[in-house]
Image: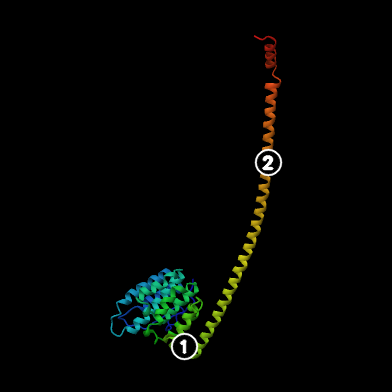
Amino acid sequence: MRSSSSVSLAGGRGSGSVRLSSSPACPVTAPVDAALEYLMVKKDFQAALDTCEKGLESLATCAEQEDSSFKYVELKAALTIVGIQALAELNQWCGVLQWVLQQYGETEKIPAKIIQMCILLYVKVDERAVMKDAVCDWLHCSGNMSQSGFSSVAELYFLHILVPMGHTAEALEMLETDVGRVAFTEEQRQAARSLVDIQNEKNATSSTTNLESVAVTTTTCASKQDKLTQRLTSIMRLLYRGLSVASVRIRSISLRRIFLALMLLYLLLIRVDPGKRSAGHFYAMHPQ
């Protein structure tokens, strides 16, 4: 994934390079140029990331030098920005915020332009929740309110995180705090309130539509279930009647068979037994 954000620093050699002023005591410009060459010319994004990390490690040794504060901040930001782009190109966007925190230690110390890049990146991949708490902490740090990019961070937070995520109450509350008063003019705050009202109306309409859809679906399912129940009841009645008739027929057939068997047994053993008739006649003719 390619980041749409661009880095605009002091012009240098070629269209894809960045040249920053530096003193011999802090030779970190070379890693910045090398990282940019890997990123933009050679398209070797892993090498670009590795170069940025090595440059950041070397830069840490220059932090204590006298009069190097401004150069240190700018060089560190440049290496971090290239590193973010390299991570994005490597499709490792999920680890960008953590990687940035490793470089700066605390969210509040991250420069405004890097916070902006992180917001845009996570919005691009639809993972706004990752940045919500971090940006909120950054905005409420009083030391960041003097940064030139503070208003841009607040605007991105309002438009691309709070409102799309449905945190409209928090968005309105933000406008009334020091963050909102510092970041926006009164006209901008009024426009922001109107935007929240529109979003709330859309949410209410969507909620009503969903409820109606659920009600229609429930009614349809209930109607189908009633019809199915009626069909099953009819089938069970037919089966019961069939079984009842069958059981009556079975019982009548069994009784007839038993009756016929008894009649046959009677006829065979009693009525038509020639031996028994002869013996009876013999005893009658020849009494002892």
Locate the C terminus and report the quarter of the image it occupies.
top right
Label disc, if present, on residue 278 of the rendered structure: none
Residue 108 placement: quadrant: bottom left
Q: Disc 1 marks which amino acid? A: Phe
Classify mark 1: residues with Cα within 10 Å, few (<14), some (14-19) or many (20+). some
Label disc, if present, on residue 248 of the rendered structure: 2
Of residues 170 and 252, the one drawn nearer to the viewer in this rendering: 252
Instruction: Give the vertical position of 253 relative to 16 (above or below).
Output: above
Number of marks? 2
- Gap in angstroms between the C-alphas marked 2 and 1: 91 Å
Farthest front residue in view: 288
Q: Disc 2 marks which amino acid? A: Val
Classify mark 2: residues with Cα within 10 Å, few (<14), some (14-19) or many (20+). few
Of residues 19 and 137, the one drawn nearer to the viewer in this rendering: 137
**Label 2 vs label 1, nearer the camera:** 2
Residue annotated with mark 1 = 184
Question: Residue 259: percent from the left, percent from the top?
Answer: 68, 31
